[in-house]
Amino acid sequence: MRVLIVSVPPKAPLVRQIESLHSLGVDVDVMEVTGIPKFKYLQCLPHFVKLADYADLIHAHYGYCGWLGLSQLHKPLVVSFMGSDLLGTPNDHGNVTYGSRVVVHCNRWLAGKVNAVIVKSAEMAHIIAPIKSHIIPNGVDMESFCPIERSEARMSLGLSIKKRYILFPARPELPTKGFPLFQAVVARASQCIPDALEPILLSGVPADKVPIYMNACDVMLLTSWWEGSPNVVKEAMACNVPVVSVPVGDVPELLNGVDESEVCPRNAEILAHAVWRRLHGSGRSNGRDALRRKGLDLKTVARKIVRVYEEVLQTTATFIRVKDSISISASLRS
């Protein structure tokens, strides 16, 4: 099976997914969509058409890449929607912008024109219903993300052993990540503990250092306006780091049955009390075991994706055989 993956320059989760598909024997080619922001998809069109000729199947990651994939009609197309392409992009107040609502409407139409759709959460699946979709969140690299003694992680980063640290797992300048709420929660929680609660931002942290930063923190707080299936939550779970989050994306399902973690309303006072409870808890969650139970390791997720590929190729082959049979029958009758 030869698959052409089309995406913008892939981030770490997609890179790991490609590697896990390779490990299952899938021959994967990757085309990165780069160029002038508003014209890059048109710029990449000739190169895409050439690469598509050599593939058995095309897997586009993100809605815009799906539109590029739809520009050819000969190879089956699988589209993975990633989040904003179906949920929209909120402004600073959490309201979805008009432009992104138009994009969502177009992507709902696109979902009905491809051979298979993969989404990250049940919320996203509901948006394109009654079109069938496969809910397959990204898997977690359980080897890279694993528990480390908190004192050891802090020493390697030069952090204090005695302080309390709370992790903001995103870039604060992104409106979708809700940094003002995070700041409000930290301010309130700091009033309830004897030592100052110090925030740590993942912004600008090299990928290989992220597990160390996670393990160094007492708790991770997610305040996003929207998410699909946030990788940072699963990565924190793999490190057995407690998580406090607003009810966004599939986080309530991810944290269901996970000790020392909570999902709370988007209210600074309530979230601050949840953070305070985690700071006075056992210090570790059972998130790693929960990930295994939910089948969210890299290899299990890769197998699910391969099954989607096999189903699409089998359905396509059956359709071609039926079509050829009808054509032969028509020729004989004439």
Image (cartoon, helix red, strand yellow):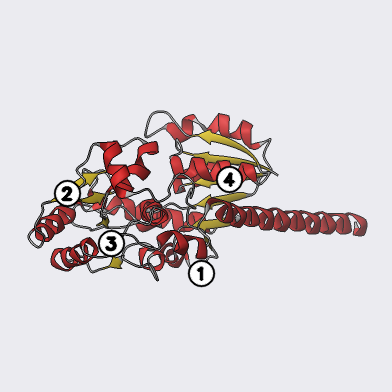
Quadrant into which the N terminus falls = top right
Question: How much space separates mark 2 and mark 1, taking CA atoms?
Answer: 51 Å
Location of mark 1 (residue): 130
Location of mark 2 (residue): 163
Residue 224 seen in the figure: no
Quadrant into which the C terminus falls = bottom right
The secondary structure type at the circle numbered 1 is loop
**Left-right relation of 157 to 254:** left
Location of mark 4 (residue): 20
- Residue depth check, mark 2 versus mark 4: number of the one nearer the observer: 2
- Residue depth check, mark 2 versus mark 1: number of the one nearer the observer: 2
Q: Earlier in the sequence, mark 2 or mark 1?
A: 1
Location of mark 3 (residue): 245
Rendering quarter of residue 26: top right
Q: Earlier in the sequence, mark 3 or mark 2?
A: 2
- Residue depth check, mark 1 versus mark 3: number of the one nearer the observer: 3
